[in-house]
Image (tube, coloured by chain):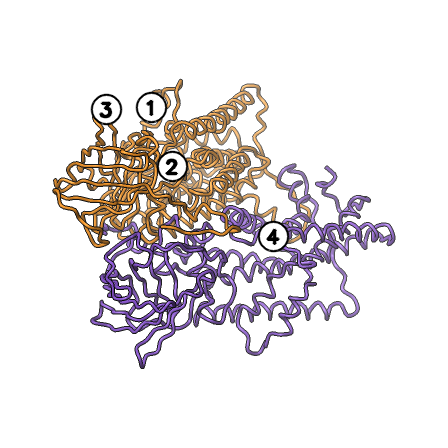
Chain colours: A purple, B orange
Amino acid sequence: MSFFQNSENIVWSAPKKWLLRFFFVFFILLIVPLSPGYFQHIFTTNWFNSNFYDWFLLTTYVPEFFGVQGFANWGIAAGVAAIVGTVWFTVVKDKDTRDDDIYYWLRVILRYRLAIGVIAFGLIKLFPLQMPYPSLSNLHTNYGDFLPWKIYFHTLAISQPYEVFLGAVEVIAGLLLLKRSFAIVGAGIIVGFTGNVFASNLAYDIGHPEYSLLLTLIAAAIALYDAPRLFSLLILQKKAIANRYQPVFEGKLPAIRKGLQISVVVFIGILTVSVSSNYRNHPYKLPQTPGLKDSYGYYNVREFKLNNEVIPYSVTDLNRWQNVVFEKWATISIKTAKPIIIDNSTGDDYQEKDIDRNYESAGVGGRRYFAYETDPDNQVISLTNKNPNHRTETFTLKYDFLNDSTIVLQGVNEQKDSVYVVLDKIERKYMLYEGRRKPVKL
Amino acid sequence: MMSEILNKVTAAVSSGKPWTGFEKYVFRTFFIFFAILLVPTNPNYYKKWVEVDWTNLHIRDIGNLSGSGFMPIKVATKREGGNDLGGFREERKYIATIYPESGEYGAWSYINWGIAFVLGAIGGAIWSVVDRRPRNYDILYYFLGAFVSFAMLIRLQGLTFSKVFPTQMPDLALTQLNTPFGDFVAQKLYWIQFSFVHNYERFAGYAELLIMFLLFFRQTRALGAALSLAMIGNIAFANHAYDGGIHLAASFYVVGGLFVLWRYIPPLWRLLVKQEDTELGIVYYPFSKPWEKALRYGIKIFVFGLFFVYAGYAHWQNYLYDSYKVPALPGLANARGLYSVDSFNVNGNAVPYSPLDSVRWQEVTLEKWATLSFSVFNTFEIHGEAGRGKQFADVDRTYESAGTGGGRRHYHHVTDSVQKVLHLQNKNKVYGEQKLDLQYERPTSEQLILWGKNEYQDSIYVVLNRKDKTYPLYQDRSQEIVWKP
């Protein structure tokens, strides 16, 4: 149990020296941006006219060596680290004090990398952007028709205070990491928090297992430094020996150190301001263009004609519209019996154009989602299916509000078939909104 | 009176440097507070230890033996079903019942803890007036911490093992897969998000099992307290955020966890933040006499045997043979599925499909077990039960139906396969009197025909055809997924 030995100074045995060098190189390779794409992002972004996601992307770096995806990069990093670490170990004979310094600087790099990573993800929950409230169309989708990741996101999103709480935990843990003496507390919180995120990533197929595991691993590596002390104090219940190592900053180091500290604080400041501004102005996962005035709601399709032929209510006819949702933004969703190839992305990146903001339509079947553009002069909306697998599906429809709850749409689809639909708004209640605190009838 | 007895007990175990007056007062307050909260005063609780069938102990019994809360005041709601106890028999007597506006989810639900704390503060003051001698409570402090830790781990067994053997969130019912997201109450959505990822449910169960183990040993108690504070504290917050309803049970791990952890915080602070060499300085009772040793090991072995080993075994058996939230009676053989309603006659007249019809059924599901569900375009009173607890009768096992609306109706049924009749009973307790007897026929394995009187005493004749439905919820995102109705 030499690992758990709590002594005044770390005894640098040969295996420990090798391990230190291995992990130093391994973590540097996983943390320090080396991919061309990362620098391309830095040099092609107009930083004076940037949105929060440009800044956010800087925090989520994971290496992709030679275009390899996923955990294979870890294997490459480990292989390189084993070679470089071994050469370093055999060629350069450092004194024990140097080992303490190397270990210290590794912890510094890990702490700052982890702090920035978790603060960024904390901020997009503190300002609940990561999991926006489920759209009305999604409320009108059967539970079994979602992909697992979408259920996980929606379940968090329906309770915004909980999402904010989780974001606050991440941000606070990240801030603790910035202070050396509190790092163990922050790292301890993150091991649990991000470890759970990793497990849910696997369970719900969310798509960031490498990143969440990397953050967990970094947190564990930081906590490891104090593990022997804690083991001695809590488990063995013997006298625990505190940290003796104090870094020495000489020459230009103090100035560089100050400069880096200030730039990290400034970076976090910019990120906070830009994230909150995105949340207040136009949450990035939702389309920006407002929908047709007073159209928001759920509609029954009372009448449906295709090429002037009436098709009665049907749950099997592939063309018959069954019901329609108008969102607050310029999206409508239509339920039909026609099969849908589901958009397998997770809609989690920043997109400028509304049609590409596919969070509402990704990972879910049951309804066909259309982004639309409005020509108010001619009272025409042009619909395009948001799903990349069905992008060719379009409608050009003239709209007419007969009264405040009836809309008539008529026009043509992409095959020049004429459609005519009469929509009646249905006022209905939702269990999700009614809650459990009062008598409910619905 | 009580303080005199305590004096005798504590005098025997007091040694070392006397505590300050303030320290003594705070300790006495918490001592009384936790004693009130954790020592069952309900005589029925002790009766259960005698009356329970020890040869055939059910998970329900283990839960009953795990403890009994202090609850002089009942916090209730007036909405129907809101006070559902999940199969526990109401056998307490309350001094008062209150109906706060926030229902049973708001701050008022903590009133009994408040009372216990006020009693502790008053009791602590009286105790301090009566007993002015120098005291050292190191040993008693240790015992109180151990007592709270054991109460925590014992009360955790049900939640732990019903996740390790996934019965707390059993498989989704087909009716849930075919209910729109907006027609579930938030509490239900929080709950069922585990019902299709049982490995994740097990992972949470193992984490809770780890907490139980860590709290069991004095060497790991600090870690156990910290972990229960973080994990179950998070669950407590979530229960408030989703009106989940078990916030009291979960919040206890915040209070208990903080109390147990409290004495470790100053040494941890000195060691890690101020970077000074540190010792815990916890004084343990020596357990030097043989009978003391025997008693200590006896208690530990008993707790481990009953609340770890046997509780685990009982939950495993429950998982295998009678998952406690799922109706036990099997449904029609090989009839599980989603059915389209292809023909529906009322009093001999065909009713064409319309999404706005309040009588014609839509989206019929039959479960593996004896539940038949369908939707109609109508509104119904929603019963306020949460669909949890360890119910005896199938009709009360409402995990699949509680907390859902949107015109979906759920019927438990008993099948008479000789007369070919389904005896249906509405699972929504508001409509519990609604009983239908429907004849059935299965011309093919994919078709089911039902006829008889519906709840409005009209004759109905229904032709159902099973759909070939796959659910994206169970698909792999790396493959192309095609949704079909």
Dots 4 and 1 on the same chain: no
Q: Are marks 3 and 1 on the same chain?
A: yes
In space, the residues marked 4 and 3 are separated at their CA atoms by: 58 Å
Residue B56 lies in quadrant: top left
Q: Which residue is mark 4?
A: A210
For label 1, the residue is B47
Question: Given this view, does label 2 or label 3 mark the residue nearer the observer?
Answer: 3
Residue A429 visible within the image: yes
Of badges 4 and 3, nearer the viewer stands 3
Q: Residues within 10 Å of mark 3 (few under 14, many from 20)?
A: few
Residue reaching furthest to the bottom: A377
Element marked by disc 4: helix
Give the distance between the C-alpha atoms of the residues marked 4 and 1, in whole angstroms. Answer: 54 Å
Query: Disc 2 residue type?
Result: Ile
Callout 3, which amino acid? Val
Give the labeled residue for mark 2: B36
Per the image, label 2 sits on a secondary structure element best described as helix
